[in-house]
Amino acid sequence: MFVATTDSELDTLLDDPESIEEFLRTDEEGRRSLDVDKSWHGIHYLLTGDAWGGEPPLDFIVSGGESVGDVDLGYGPARAFDSEDVRDLARALAPITPEKLFERWDPAAIATAEIYAIQPDDDEEREYIGAYYVQLKEFVTAAARDGLGMIVYLT
């Protein structure tokens, strides 16, 4: 899950991490969010070449940012990326088209890496991941353009 936030909202959450659940439940008018379903791990792997690591800023799906306390939202705490982090991320994603992303699509390597919920020999999986990657890139680009930060968490 990705939620666009102001830096002020991030500061509040970092000062009071226990408020993260209420913040995420509250559907503020205009608050942008994106759920990439089960594609998150495949996108992360294709961006970084690593199942659980990678280099910043492209490792943002599973690491990086500042932990918002220790409130477990399903698979650990949320992580905060301020507006400067999001601008850096948008610049890093800019040249990565879906075609470029899929240059790393190696079914044997994906199977060995045990990427969550991905069947690497299925062409529909590529389309599924590609569609969510495009949405994620657009989400990050829009947040950066609007000077927003971002909360990332796994459910």
Image (cartoon, grey):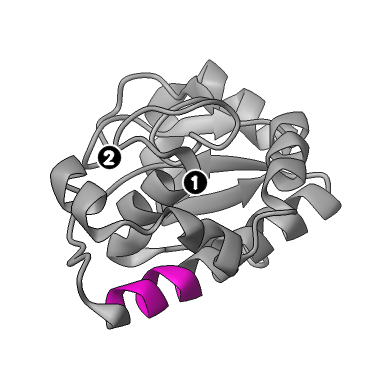
Q: Is residue 27 visible?
A: no
Which three-letter amino acid code belongs to the residue tagged 2?
Leu
**Of pointers 1 and 2, the one earlier in the residue sequence:** 1
How dense is the environment of label 2, judged by Cα within 10 Å: few (below 14), some, or many (20 and up)?
some
**Relative to 106, 24 lies left or right:** right
The residue at which mark 1 appears reads as 47
Q: Is residue 36 visible?
A: yes
* Residue 67: numbered disc: none
Which three-letter amino acid code belongs to the residue tagged 1?
Leu
Image quadrant where residue 30 sits: bottom right
- Secondary structure category for the residue under label 2: loop
* Above or below 18: residue 153: below
- Secondary structure category for the residue under label 1: helix
* Above or below 121: residue 73: above
Q: Residue at x 64, y 64 (%)?
A: 97
Residues shaded magenta? 125-131
Q: Mainly helix, strand or loop, the magenta region?
A: helix
Q: Residue at x 54, y 51 (%)?
A: 3
Q: Residue at x 24, y 47 (%)?
A: 109
Q: Out of 127 and 31, give the one closest to the viewer.
A: 127
Image quadrant where residue 39 sits: bottom left
Q: CA distance from mark 1 to mark 2?
A: 24 Å
**Relative to 112, 4 lies left or right:** right
Q: Out of 131 and 150, give the one closest to the viewer.
A: 131
The residue at which mark 2 appears reads as 73
